[in-house]
C-alpha cells in the first residue's frame, strides 16, 4: 500500500482501482494524468459517466445497451427480423457488427451459465429468448457464444429449451478457437465463423 500525500488522491486511486484490470499503480498513473488535464475535460468525463449510469437503457427486445427503449438495431426495418443471433454480452454484438457479415437481430443473454460463479439460467435472459421465439416470426436462432465450457453448456441448455419450437438452431463454425473469447476474435475469423454456421448438434 502506497503512502499518499493527499486523502483526496488516495480516494480517487482507490475508486479507480476498483475497475477490472486496473491495479493500484495503474490507477495512480491515470489519476495523476487527469490532474494535469483541463478541468473542463474532467467535468465532461464525470458528467458522461454519471449520465451513462443513470440514463442508459437496455433494449426491451434484445437487451442490448441503448439510449431508447428499443435499440437502433431492433428498430431498423432493413434488418432480417427472422434471424436472431444469441450472444453473451454487448461487446459480442459490437464485434459481430464490426464484421459487416450479419444483418439479423440479436439477443443478449448477459452472461453464460457458470455454476462455479453462481450463475444459473434464471440469472440470464434465456426465458425472454424462449418467449421471443414462441411469439413467432423467428426462423433461425444462431448460437454465437464463446467456445468455452460455459458457452457450450449454455448452448446446450438453450437448444433443449427451444427444441420443441419450429425454429432452425445453428451454431457459429469453429473457426473461433476453443476457449477463445468472442469479443477478442479478429473480425475476419469471426465473420467467416458466422457465415459458415452449422446446425447445432448435441
Image (cartoon, rainbow, N blue to C red):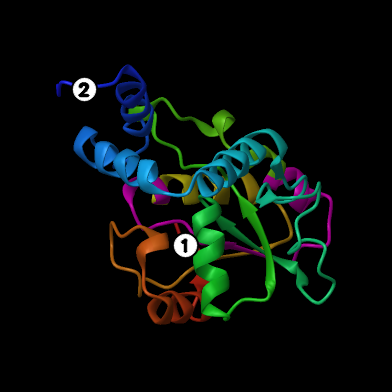
Q: To which residue does mark 1 refer?
A: 201
Q: Is residue 145 left or right of residue 117?
A: right
Seen at 35% across and 75% down, the residue is 175
Percent from the top left, x then y, of residue 49?
57, 40
Seen at 45% across and 38% down, the residue is 113
- In front of the other: 85 or 135: 85
Q: To which residue does mark 2 refer?
A: 4
The quarter of the displayed image where residue 188 is located: bottom left
- In front of the other: 109 or 196: 109
Q: Tell me the element at label 2.
A: loop
The crowd level at tag 2 (other Cα within 10 Å; few <14, some 14-19, many 20+) is: few
Q: Is residue 32 left or right of residue 192?
A: left
Q: Quadrant of the N terminus?
A: top left
Q: Tell me the element at label 1.
A: loop
Percent from the top left, x then y, of residue 108?
60, 50
Percent from the top left, x then y, of residue 34?
38, 44
Seen at 33% across and 28% down, the residue is 116
Q: Is residue 140 magenta?
A: yes
- In front of the other: 62 or 143: 62
The quarter of the displayed image where residue 125 is located: top right
- Magenta segment: 129-151
Q: Is residue 50 left or right of residue 58?
A: left
Amino acid at each position: 500500500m502506497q503512502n499518499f500525500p493527499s486523502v483526496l488522491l488516495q480516494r480517487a486511486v482507490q475508486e479507480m482501482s476498483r475497475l477490472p484490470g486496473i491495479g493500484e499503480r495503474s490507477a495512480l498513473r491515470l489519476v495523476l494524468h487527469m490532474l494535469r488535464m483541463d478541468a473542463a475535460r474532467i467535468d465532461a468525463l464525470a458528467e458522461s459517466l454519471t449520465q451513462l449510469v443513470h440514463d442508459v437503457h437496455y433494449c426491451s427486445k434484445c437487451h442490448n445497451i441503448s439510449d431508447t427503449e428499443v435499440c437502433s438495431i431492433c428498430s431498423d426495418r432493413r434488418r432480417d427480423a427472422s434471424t436472431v443471433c444469441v450472444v453473451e454480452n454487448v461487446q459480442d454484438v459490437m464485434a459481430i457488427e464490426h464484421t459487416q457479415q450479419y444483418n439479423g437481430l440479436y439477443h443478449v443473454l448477459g452472461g453464460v451459465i457458470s455454476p462455479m460463479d453462481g450463475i444459473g439460467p434464471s440469472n440470464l435472459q434465456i426465458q425472454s429468448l424462449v418467449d421471443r421465439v414462441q411469439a413467432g416470426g423467428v426462423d433461425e436462432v444462431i448460437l454465437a457464444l464463446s467456445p468455452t465450457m460455459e458457452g457450450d453448456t449454455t448452448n446446450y441448455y438453450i437448444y433443449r429449451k427451444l427444441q420443441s419450437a419450429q425454429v432452425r438452431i445453428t451454431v457459429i463454425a469453429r473457426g473461433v478457437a476453443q476457449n477463445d473469447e468472442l469479443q477478442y476474435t479478429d473480425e475476419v475469423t469471426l465473420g467467416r465463423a458466422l457465415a459458415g454456421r452449422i446446425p447445432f448438434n448435441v
